[in-house]
Amino acid sequence: MDWKQERERVLNGAKRVVVKVGSAVLTTGLGVDLAVVRSLAGQLAQLHDRGTEVVLVSSGAVAAGRNVLRACCEIKGMPDKQAASAVGQSRLMHFYNEAFEEHGKLSAQILLTKDDLKSRHRFLNARNTFASLLQWRAIPIVNENDTVAVQELEFGDNDSLASLLINVVEADLYVNLTSASGVYADNPDTTENARVLDVIEDVHALNLDTMCGGKTSVGTGGMYSKLLAARRAAQLGVPTLILSGREPDAIVRAFSGEMLGTWVCAEAKAVSRRKFWMAYNTDPAGVLVVDDGAVRALSQGHKSLLPAGVVRVDGNFQRGALVRVTTLAGVVVGVGLCNYTAADLRRVLGMKSAELKAVLGDNQYPEAIHRDNLLMDAVV
């Protein structure tokens, strides 16, 4: 099956879709663009009417609040930005509620921080909440909880949040709405007549630094973050459609077979949802730098990482912490759960398994990271 047939099959048969829309699509210099909100709600209602469950990840709260406060308040620093989000979020949801009600659709607001998905217990609670809402035929509208998030609890941008929600709700398609017509073959800011790619068959092979440049003026993302999110989705076996959010009826037309936007193919072999959750819902607490032999054993031999292959440990972490594994040149190999504290691992760097007991005593793991707790090619 070629990618066009796969695209047609997925769009015709998608049961649950995560749709993400950013500030660059939703807002103008005058605040939230109500015409865009109404158009988006109408298109998602049509998708919903055909039996597809929809989860919408929407930015725009800070931009909406900033516009309301512009006449009376100067917004400076993170506390002001979080307060602007509090002002804007209620207005944004009001617009969505009214727009979906026009089509007889029930909408619901869910605000998340990274901590909500980091804890396995809270992750499962969030999954159960989504399951109930979708069973009621509601359309959940999700945003980062900017009013309480601090740096270590932030997703970074809603592209990252949306990619994690694909795992939470077990979606089979990810639609990312952008201010562009799709993914350009070259940076359109520096390349005249850059063309839009119809398909990206191997998103992991792209040089994103060359293709993408900077962030949008009103959002925190850009095409770079959208392609990172698509990489994560591809690892789960979920394809991505990157589509213009301002093209008239683009979603409906794409689901009707029109070749709009850029189709990002899923990987043929999906990673387990457990490994996906392990790798992406916690920030790495340290770095293990490994030698070339260890890189070959991990990438070609599909082996566990042994202390013998570790040449340097960066950070101060406890046993069971998520760590990043890199080459000597700093290239990320993967992420995994370390069986040692940082201090203990430094004591046994380069040692063979038979030598570990003499240094650390009994009950030591032979692996620094077991293969079952390692995700290769992690998008971090």
Image (spheres, rainbow, N blue to C red):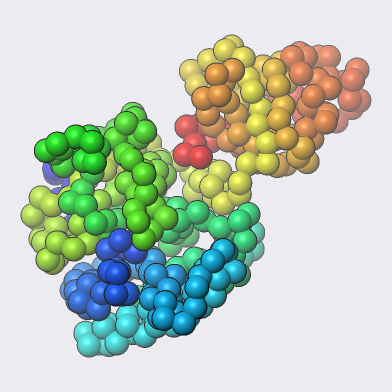
Count how many numbered circles sit on residues in the image. 0
The image position of residue 61, as x and y in percent, is: 42, 72
* Residue 128 in view here: no
Q: Is residue 29 left or right of residue 228?
A: left
Q: Would you identify the image quadrant in which residue 115 lies?
A: bottom right
The image position of residue 47, as x and y in percent, is: 21, 70
Front in this rendered view, residue 123 or 38: 38
Front in this rendered view, residue 246 or 215: 215
Q: Is residue 59 left or right of residue 275?
A: left
Front in this rendered view, residue 240 or 52: 240
Image point (24%, 41%), residue name? 189
Q: Is residue 325 above or below residue 61?
A: above
Front in this rendered view, residue 76 or 216: 76
Q: Is residue 286 above or below residue 243?
A: above
Q: Is residue 328 above or below residue 319?
A: above
Image point (53%, 35%), residue name? 375
* Residue 68 in view here: yes
The image position of residue 238, as x and y in percent, is: 34, 48
**Quadrant that contains the N terminus:** top left
The image position of residue 310, as x and y in percent, is: 69, 20
Q: Is residue 366 left or right of residue 347?
A: left
Q: Would you identify the image quadrant in which residue 40 lies?
A: bottom left
Image point (14%, 57%), residue name? 254
Q: Is residue 181 above or below residue 315?
A: below
Q: Would you identify the image quadrant in which residue 318 lies?
A: top right
Image point (28%, 69%), residue name? 28
